[in-house]
Image: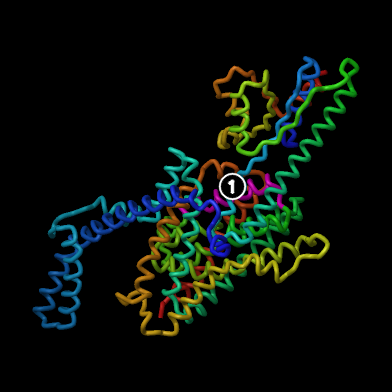
Amino acid sequence: MDGEPHTDEAMHWALDLALGLGVALNLVHIRDPYLKQFSTEIYAQGREEYLEHVQRCLEEKAQMARASFESAVKECVEGRRDVKELDWKFDVLDGDPAEQLAALIKRGEYSMLVLGRRRRTRIAALKPRDVAEKLSSLRSSVPILVVPETARDETSTNG
Amino acid sequence: MTKLRSLVVPGWTKIIPGLVFCIVFAVIVMNIDHVLGKYHKADVASAAIPAIEERLVEATALGDVGSIDSAEKQLAKQQKALDNVDGTVGDAWPVATLLYQKFQFKYVAMLLVGGILIRNIFGLPEILKPGVAAARPLIKPGIIILGVHYVWSDVVRVGGTGMILAAVFIFGTAITVMWLSRKYGVSDGLGGIMGAGTGVCGVSAIIATAPVVGAKPRDMAYAIGTILLFGTAMLFIMPYLGQALGISEPQFGAWSALAILNTAQLIAAAEWYGEEARNTAVLINAARIMLIPLIVVFAVWFYGIKGEGKGIDFWATIRAKFPIFILGFFVLIILNSAGIAFLGGPKSAGTPFWAMDAVYKWFFAIGFAGIGLSISIEDMKKAGGTAFAIGSGAATAKMVIGLIVVLLLGTELLRVGGG
């Protein structure tokens, strides 16, 4: 999860599932260092400052993700009479999101993976495969629940 | 000892495999380029020799000493080109001419296209990535060495014209992009990096500006993807467009320096187009990159950015963002202009400047290998959102206006004489 609407929706689905089934929930935020590679651009000036800025942004986003998750857990637990608490964990990993999640799946420590998926426009075919697509193509015994960006709104509208 | 240790880049061993790969790739391509060029020259010579011989016979009959001398020199040159491939008059190598002249398949194109194909079809192993990234800045020493091609009159005429054009284009683009971004509610971070990126020198300007304007990671990814997409597209479109429009080499050099969004791509496009194009582009680009610190300061002023309690230090920002390596380029121009006999010149065989000129192409070749191998279609696919709209508008406008301007200026004002 990274504070984007689609990952927020996935987080709420994961919370509902974990509370409903009474299982532990592990939230993962991945700090993608993708932007750091551009510091080697040939005429780049202030490389250190740029790298520090990117790192600061990644750390802030991780903190925001954690705060958002804690508040969602509190809200969900308080909103349900049948549950008093939730066994949860928040992990921050570094690396390519698809690779990191694939490694988690391979370890086989989880009974299910819940992922958000950003709404795709018509030119989506030109875009790279997203994390959900990449992980869906993996051979794995862990079921993957992909939550589309609008799912939560539609669910609430449909009652 | 500690001082010595501080000179060693941490993790330098990681760059060795990728750097060696780039060097090997460059050596292979430079040899293919050499062989292709040799057969192309022989093909041209094989067709030209009968006509020169006819002229020689006519000049001998007329007793025109000047024409005889000129024809003999031409004949000797063409015969040498033919001898280089052990050919005789009547032999033909049309494929070499087709590739080398018609398709302009020279070392720049081979390294860039080859690099892009290797990176995007076979992928680049992780072990090679640090070295490939380290190979790209090797263009810098190549640019410094190119200083031996210029004298101060070039700097004043072409560089002066280029500085005015660059300043107008850079600030024109940056002001327009930042103003429109603010008007249409684009965040300061994205407006700032797109203004600098489309105005000055693409990703390098984004790197310099992003921390100052506080750009968000997602905006940076969109902006970098957009700049790389348009820079790469223009790199491959503009040389062919220039040829189709019959633009002279100095005009093309100026056009690429004004219009191509990313610096690496503009040097590559100009080098690809020809020596005169490269000379003009490098000089105007030198003027352009010196404006990076000013554009950062402009962004700070435009968005009213304040530092943490103490304000932004104008001179500290200028110092931090100034591309110091470009001073080396100007030092060589000064030395070349001074006419020191010992140093010679790029065309005086056996002199220090001749030796330096002989190696610049190798720095460029290794740098271009790194650039080609770094062009990832996946990175360009990240282009999107508002950044894409801004980038496409700025790229098109700069290309069209830049073309009109260089056509109006003509060739001579933009030609580097080199003394």
Mark 1 nearby-residue class (10 Å; few <14, some 14–19, many ≥20): many
Q: Is residue A41 left or right of residue B138?
A: right
Give the prevailing secondary structure in the magenta stretch.
helix
Mark 1 residue element:
helix
Please name whichever residue, A107 or A40, is drawn nearer the observer in this view of the structure.
A107
Q: Quadrant of residue B381?
A: top right
Q: Which residues are magenta?
A: B215-237
Residue found 86% across the figure and 28% down from its top: A74
Residue found 74% across the figure and 40% down from its top: A62
Q: Is residue B120 among what the camera can see?
A: yes
Q: Position of residue B144 (x, y in %)?
A: 47, 69
| Chain of the residue on which disc 1 is drawn | B
Q: Is residue A92 found inside the magenta-colored segment of the image?
A: no
Residue found 54% across the figure and 57% down from its top: B9
Residue type, numbered disc 1? Gly
Please name whichever residue, B161 or B132, is drawn nearer the observer in this view of the structure.
B132
Q: Position of residue B211 (x, y in %)?
A: 70, 56
Q: Is residue B49 left or right of residue A3?
A: left
Q: Is residue B241 among what the camera can see?
A: no
Residue under pointer 1: B225
State the quadrant of the C terminus of chain A.
top right
